[in-house]
Amino acid sequence: MSAVLGPSTAVAALAAGPLYQDARTAMVLISVGDDSVLSANLRTLRVTRAPESFQAFPLTSYLTDVRPVDRTAVIDDRSAGRTGWELTNRLRLQPPDEGTTSVHPVAAGSDDCAPAVRAALAAKAQAVVFSGTSPERAARCARALADAGFTGPRLATWRIMRPTFLQEAGTAGQDWLFGTPFTDPGSVSRTFRTAYRARYGTAPGRWAPEAYDAVGLVTRALERLGGTADIEAGAVAQRIFTGTYQGLAKTLRFTDGSHTLDPRGALYFLFQAKGDAFRFLGRNDQVKPVQG
């Protein structure tokens, strides 16, 4: 075994990580970016997605470079636990466009976003970010914002991007923006999409390009080590660290001495709710203001 792709949950990664480390085998994570895993002392861990704790970055980037605002409000859904707290805290400490961020909590046991929305608008918010992870609760927030007449930018993270949000929010959910650590499978190489459909009988789903890139990363390491059957797993784990790999989704380059990607790379993307789907806008650093 040269390397392992996965697991796909933080709990499984923390359980399996020490076993792969003892075997000097790279554990290459594709969709897991939790701090609990990233901070673990696992020498053979390699993570090919951006950290979840930096998920505020594409939202801040949008509200700074595309739709600049001076006053951002966070609807702080306390049911989201640490994930919601990290997003809220980063937006509070680093407001978009060097402006200000106000925080308006919704208790974990409450389904009523209206008081928080009223407080956000009383603070003269020009943009609103929902910090939660529940599509249903985000939909309630969307309806409360629409009822209050708010039409500015409304943003959330990839965890909200489920059909439930579109169905329950209805027209109130239209034009919401979402920052993600994954690209749009329909926007990558046509060759990849065709081959995927031929092999699996369906279009590639979420994280498919990222999984393909992880395979390519390991394959390149094997090739550079000679491509023979006797290559030791430890050598593969070390080789993955070196150089830059241009994948379908993004460029993979690891920070020196770290098992995470270089944060100077373009690691996040933006989607927007349109109709009954989430439309891909592009890499967060390539989205441009709408003219006219």
Image (cartoon, rainbow, N blue to C red):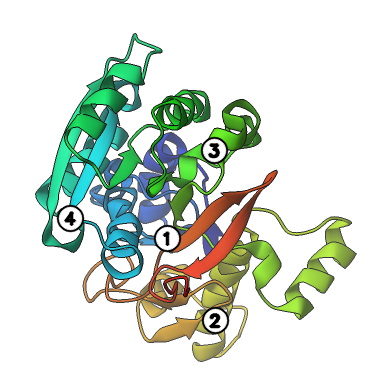
**Residue 23 location in percent, x, y?**
42, 56
Residue reaching furthest to the top: 109
Left or right? Give the position of 242 relative to 68: right
Whichever of labels 4 and 2 marks the residue nearer the N terminus, that label is 4
Gap between marks 4 and 2, in whole Å?
50 Å
Query: Residue at position x 48%, y 74% from top?
Result: 250
Q: CA distance from mark 3 to mark 1?
A: 27 Å
Q: Are marks 2 and 1 in contact (CB under 8 Å)?
A: no
Task: Say which element carries label 1.
Answer: loop
Give the spatial CA distance, label 2 vs label 1.
21 Å
Label 3: element kind:
helix
Amino acid tagged 1? Arg
Decide which of tag 3 and tag 4 comes sooner along the chain: 4
Residue denoted by label 4: 70
Q: Depth-wise, is mark 4 or mark 2 nearer the camera?
A: 4
Tell me if I can see residue 159 in this picture.
yes
Residue 222 circle label = 2
The residue depicted at 42 percent of the width and 27 percent of the height is 141
| Image quarter of residue 202 | bottom right
Task: Categorize mark 1 by other alpha carbons within 10 Å: few (<14), some (14-19), many (20+).
Answer: many
Gap between marks 4 and 1 measured at Cα: 30 Å
Q: Mark 3 or mark 2: name the one nearer the start of the chain.
A: 3
From the image, tell me which residue sits under label 3: 173
The amino acid type found where label 2 is placed reads: Leu
Closer to the eye: label 3 or 1: 3
Q: Are marks 3 and 4 in contact (CB under 8 Å)?
A: no
Which residue does the image show at 69% across and 54% down from the upper left?
A: 205
Which residue is found at the position 62% from the left and 32% from the top? Answer: 170
Give the Cα distance between marks 3 and 2: 46 Å
